[in-house]
Image: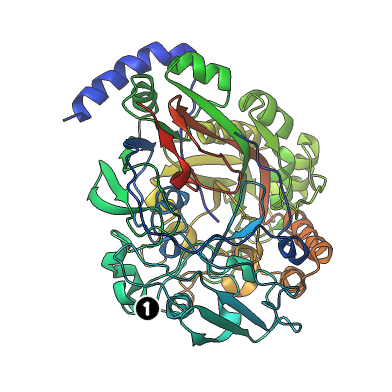
Amino acid sequence: MEKRTSNRFKTGAFALLLCLSIILAACGSGTPVATEAAPTEAASAAQPAAPEAPAAPTAGGGGTVSLIIPEEPTTLNFYASDAAIVRQVADATSMTGLDNVNEKGEFVPVLAQGLPTEANGGLAADHLSVTWKLLPGLKWSDGEPITSDDIKFTWEVLSNPNAGALSGTGGINLIQTIEMPDELTAVVKYSSPYAGYLSQFSSGLLPRHATGKPEEMSSWEWNRKPVGAGPFMVTEWASGESITMERNPYYFQAGKPHLDKLIFRIVPEPAAQLALMMQGETQVQLWPGIDDVAEYAKTVGDTAHEVMVPGVWNMAIDFNLSKPFDKDPGATPPHPILGDLRVRQAIAHAIDYDTLVKDVLRNTVKPSTNPFAYGWYQCDLPRAYPFDVEKAKQLLDEAGWVVGADGIRVAKGAKYAADGTRLSLELQGYTNYEPLQRTEEFIVENLKAVGVEARIQNYDFSIIFGTYSDNSPRMIGDFDMLIFDRSFNVEPQGAVEDTYLSTNIPSPANPTGGNSRRWVNADADAAIKEAGATFDLSARKAAYCKLGDLVTKDVAQIFTYVFQDGYGFANNITGYTVSTWGSMVWDVQNWEYSK
């Protein structure tokens, strides 16, 4: 799962912030709403016609577009990171794969001639073999041919336990081998059927000739200057300032991209971002932080506008069920406070979800009760433990937590905590995201009302979402509660396995595991296996909803709300389509810019 950052603020403060932004700028100078469709075999049988074979490249001539990003990606290798910001930049250069998800939520072929299905013979009847065929004449951005061996190499990297892949690994362990009968054909052989096969090579191919050894992926020079199949290629990376890309002369779509150059400007300060858009110095803004189109127009003026689309960013509190700071990243011993289900249930009952959505977030979000809040797998589950202050107090009383002199409870006969232990927990989040700060402060007050002390501790993104080798608190298990927004794509199986399987707890032996909650549940494991073992969408959804019910009732997480996504576009940018399922630049090859 991934996280995003941005800031929102009231327009009443804009004048003051604008003054600051102008100063910062001076110092630093020198749509259609997506609809949802299931990734079904039946749907793909009626897929769009395969793209034509690549034609000779033509000149762009469309000028330079500057895009604002609020933070700097650590890499442009999608597979080496789980940070959302990586995709927002990498989609323009290194993430062009065999297929992709369009604005309707449908898989469509990209570098492949078509989508493999049973109807066209690409998917074997036993679902143990998938045949991909590349378009003829494809080239990497350095002019070398793209072949089936690059598909095989991508699998070799992602399946290598020492590569450190954090994204795009769903079902990779089920691939036994990839045969290459010719340079355009790759036959993927599976040990057991994998329903998410269409997503496995959709996030970009890795060129064998231009990267390095699989086990050295984290240190490839390619990660910062990739040779890719996308519409642009990196020409300069000025750390902390900007990433510049120029058009790929070997891009496979004739006459595209229209633009000559992209400049991703790294601008953390929201006021500075808006000032740049208002002055016309930048043309695209990622996550403006104003969830009202009219308010954005009033703020920026007539130079730009905002486009909103239903989002996929699902805000939730993750509980650490294991004892922190014991130098043991495993699931045992239990957390002295949160190891008791009654405490977690009480925390869930203590949160006033309606007020959080309507007043604190000003109805800019929609309520969420479980991990599966959108898409074909959406589960409309009731909130397992709705807002009920008295019930929360009762549960804490029963769990052996009595009210202390200052109103905060202390242990007296608690299940795991020694008598006298204060019911005090750290609530970790990430910095520079004002809606999250508001959410945290509201939750802290809610918990205080029932005798739970929650201490906000926000860290830099690189700490919260760092790796096991970085000693990131969530990876090594040294945290109490962690709140952030996360997402699933159209095909969720790989991310679901990584996030919830009991075998995916991060450890020295499994440093990329995603089950940072240390949640072990045999019924959940069975539901995940059930969802991945069938191609029947209704059966898969039922299994996901069973998993969602287990997550919420066992209170491994508390889900609160889902964001909208917003993008700012200069009025002289055309040709774009905003997608729930895509990044800011998912269709940048189509953009046009008139000065």
Given residues 579 and 556, the one toward you in this image is: 579
Q: Quadrant of the N terminus?
A: bottom right
Q: Amino acid at mark 1?
A: Pro
Judge left or right: residue 222 versus residue 129.
Answer: left
456 relative to 376, above or below: above
Q: Quadrant of the C terminus?
A: top left
- Residue 393, given in percent of the width and then of the height, sits at 75, 40
Structure colour scheme: rainbow
Q: Residue at x 29, y 69 (%)?
A: 220
Q: Residue at x 37, y 36 (%)?
A: 68
398 relative to 441, above or below: below
Judge left or right: residue 553 versus residue 481.
Answer: right
- Residue 58, given in percent of the width and then of the height, sits at 35, 51
Quadrant hosting residue 470: bottom left
187 relative to 236, above or below: below
- Residue 154, given in percent of the width and then of the height, sits at 45, 75
Given residues 138 and 69, the one toward you in this image is: 138
In the picture of the structure, the residue carrying the numbered disc 1 is 214
Q: Is residue 422 visible?
A: no
- Residue 474, given in percent of the width and then of the height, sits at 49, 58
- Number of residues whose C-alpha sits closer than 10 Å to that of mark 1, classed few (under 14), some (14–19) or many (20 or more): many
186 relative to 577, above or below: below
Q: Is residue 76 visible?
A: yes
Quadrant hosting residue 572: top left
Badge 1 marks a residue whose secondary structure is helix
